[in-house]
Image: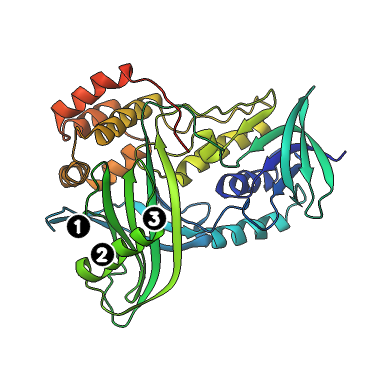
Amino acid sequence: MPEADIAIIGAGAAGLSLAHRLSCPPPRPGRLSVVLVDAPPGPLRPPRRTWCFWEAGRGRFDAAVTRSWHRLRVRHPSGESVQHDIAPLTYKMIRSDDFERLVERDLARSAQVQRLEATVESIEDLPQGARVNTRTPEGHADSLRARWVFDSRPLGSLPAARTTLLQHFHGWFVRTDRPVFDPARVEFMDFRTAQPARGLSFGYVLPTGPRAALVEYTEFSPAVLAPDVYDKALRHYTGSVLGLGDLEIIGTETGVIPMTDARFARRTGACVFRIGAAGGATRPSTGYTFSGVQRQTAAVAAALRQGRDPVPPQPHTARARGMDAVLLHALDSGLVDGAAFFSRLFARVPMARLLRFLDGETRWHEDLAIGLRTPVLPMLRAALEVPGLPRRPFPR
């Protein structure tokens, strides 16, 4: 049975990020051996994705960044807009293919990380470690023993929660006949879309040039839509709202991100842990995950190198998760109008401060000041109701 210090299951953002951090030589003798287990091509592999996040200055993965921006705009349903320069932050876009190429290039230079293509069928606790039972692409059963196992695969079902909304979206990568996009500005949330009966919807535009952009239709609501409904919404948004005229669709992107106040177990065995979205890295109120993954995997890599118990930390503070639970309930119950809520918030609070808030980098008095710029009475009512809400499983 092959052995390693660390087994990482899944080569999505979380698995690749942890492998990348562990591929760098440690500052002392005694390198950790790592096996990254990736599913064979097919439905178990992560789909192609576009990840966006913000940070100040240069970042670890800048070589994979497709485009970056300093200006973000939010549009009210009436068409009124507010635009902010988010300096010193930069809003960055990474395509998963580019991210994989960057990480794979660095892993190829490392003697510490080995790649294994196999389907993981089960994980068993062992004394001082765990056994990862796999099946090769040819159908042969095999296994790997590791001191620590980090599982980044998506969960089969969500944990019970008081409130769960889905952030579901469909996007077109478009090319237009004429220059219609401002490459220096992101349409961050454009609420000039038909609003659902429960939750909210908005358009989202990431321009990569004057004639090219990723244009998405996004909803926060309890259930996904039929594929033709997303296309209809995008045709309306690109045509009637944005007035793009003739365009060519050169690619598409679809996704579903749970926005939930569920408690995610990050330890599932004595030496087995979950990381990434399965380990609670997604920010409940926004669906952003990439920054949480980086904080989580950085902490795990540091603990492993220092010989500490490498339990993945919760990347979002208890205070942030509590405020997110209140917002999710307010949106789901209709206590606040989602489009009006976010339009008002971005109009009254500098966007750089809001982005720091969403990364958990604001202090309590800043959080209070932001809270006072929301509809106070409905949010107070939501805060009073949340503790009494039962936690229920989310239907598949």
Give left or right: position of 56 versus 295: left
Point 54% across, 37% down: residue: 278
Residue linked to disc 3: 226
Point 57% across, 31% down: residue: 312
Observer able to see residue 261: yes
- Marking on residue 357: none
Residue linked to disc 1: 192
Numbered disc 2: secondary structure: helix
Instruction: Please tell me which of labels 3 and 2 falls first in the chain.
Output: 3
388, above or below 322, in the image: above
| Front-lying residue, 26 or 36 | 36
Instruction: Please tell me which of labels 3 and 1 falls first in the chain.
Output: 1
Residue linked to disc 2: 237
Q: Identify the amino acid type marked 1.
A: Arg
> Is disc 2 in contact with disc 1, using a CB cutoff of under 8 Å?
yes
| Front-lying residue, 348 or 303 | 348
Q: Identify the amino acid type marked 3.
A: Ala
Numbered disc 1: secondary structure: loop
Circle 2 Cα neighbour tier, 10 Å, few/some/many (<14 / 14–19 / ≥20): many
Circle 1 Cα neighbour tier, 10 Å, few/some/many (<14 / 14–19 / ≥20): some
Q: Position of residue 198 (x, y in %)?
A: 26, 41
Numbered disc 3: secondary structure: loop
> Is disc 3 in contact with disc 2, using a CB cutoff of under 8 Å?
no
Q: Position of residue 376 (x, y in %)?
A: 15, 28
> What's the coloring here?
rainbow
Point 53% across, 35% down: residue: 157
